[in-house]
Amino acid sequence: METLDGALAEAIKTDWRMAPGLSGREVAILTYTEKLTRHAYKILPEDLEALRAVGLDDTGILQVNLIASWFNYINRVADGLGIGKA
């Protein structure tokens, strides 16, 4: 999701569940990416079906997974090296 709405961007950063105006598709993607980030080992077929229910095909699901996984990976690399820490 891209937005020039600063208030919406801040609401998403604070708690995406409370952010106004997110589509069902955006909520499904955020739900999946949060579970992937926090509890990847708990991903079930139902989680993928929730993405299909909002119009993602296997390629779209793979893209969401790869992007979220890459950000998780690169953040752990940076954290592990102390990058950004004073």
Image: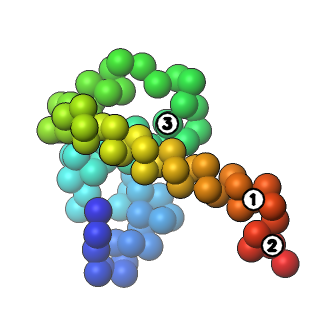
Q: Is residue 47 left or right of residue 42?
A: left
26 left or right of 7 in image: left
Mark 3 neighbour class, 10 Å CA radius: few under 14, some 14 to 19, many 20 or more: some
**Residue at 81%, 61% in the rendered image:** 81
Q: Is residue 56 visible?
A: yes
Q: Which residue position holds label 3?
A: 35
Which residue is pictured at 35% across the width and 18% down the height?
A: 45
Which percent across, then down, holds residue 23? 21, 53
In this picture the colour scheme is rainbow
Q: Which residue is mark 1?
A: 79
Q: Position of residue 5 (x, y in %)?
A: 30, 79
Q: Earlier in the sequence, mark 3 or mark 1?
A: 3
Q: Earlier in the sequence, mark 1 or mark 2?
A: 1
* Amino acid type of the residue tagged 1 in the rendering: Asp
Name the disc covering residue 60, or none: none
Alpha carbon of mark 3 to alpha carbon of mark 1: how far? Answer: 20 Å
Report whether 62 appears left or right of 70.
Answer: left
In this picture, is 28 found above or below 20? above
Q: Is residue 40 above or below residue 25?
A: above
User: Given the image, on which type of amino acid does mark 3 rest?
Assistant: Lys
Residue 86 x, y percent position in the rendering: 84, 78
Judging by the rendered image, the residue that carries numbered circle 2 is: 85
Query: Which residue is depicted at the point 27% across and 51% down?
Result: 26
Q: Quadrant of the N terminus?
A: bottom left
